[in-house]
Image (cartoon, rainbow, N blue to C red):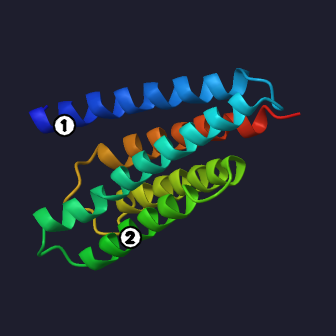
Amino acid sequence: MTDTTLTLIVASGALAVTLVRLSVTAARLDVNSPARLVAELRLAQFAALVLALFGGIYIGIPLVQEASPGAGIDVALAIGFLAIASAAITQEPARALTLVSLGFAGHAVVALAHGADRLPSDSVPEWFPVACAIYDVTVAAVCYLPIVRRP
């Protein structure tokens, strides 16, 4: 395992722990409390930043493997994730959390498409698509938890 892979795993874990903490905090608060609204907004904003960061992976990969065919689609998808994250931070919390959750679900689909060779896959490690998809689906569920916990 390379230092880069280990750093990616540790950083992803730290981001996930932060998202879980923010989500649980928001879900535990009274639905009619202003503190709940603020907690959901914080979760949505942080999740949008993480989505933009993880979407950026699909810009970094083609930069390293610029001769890879179809790399332009990865860049376009990355811009799409950035657009979703940007749109989410301008919405009210429930809609923002829904957008971010859908963004992470979409990111999982893109990761699996790389693993199934539907998108360029020569530049990603063999383990990456499945691990990324599992992470993305988990984060999507964590982000959506406060919405589900509403009466």
Task: Give the residue drawn at x 28%, y 68%.
Answer: 120
Badge 1 density bin: few <14, some 14–19, many ≥20, Cα 10 Å: few
Q: Is residue 122 something one can see in this rendering? A: no
Label of residue 5 in the image:
1
Q: Is residue 75 something one can see in this rendering? A: yes
Residue 54: percent from the left, percent from the top? Answer: 36, 51
Q: For the C terminus, which image quadrant?
A: top right
Q: Nearer the viewer, residue 59 or 40?
A: 40
Side of 135 where 57 appears, left or right: left
The mark that comes first in sequence, 2 or 1, is 1
Badge 2 density bin: few <14, some 14–19, many ≥20, Cα 10 Å: some
Q: What residue is pinned by disc 2?
A: 79
Q: Amino acid at mark 1?
A: Thr
Q: Is residue 74 above or below residue 54?
A: below
Q: Amino acid at mark 2?
A: Ile
- Residue 118, quarter of the rendered image: bottom left
Distance of label 2 from label 1 (alpha carbons): 24 Å
Camera-near label (2 vs 1) is: 2
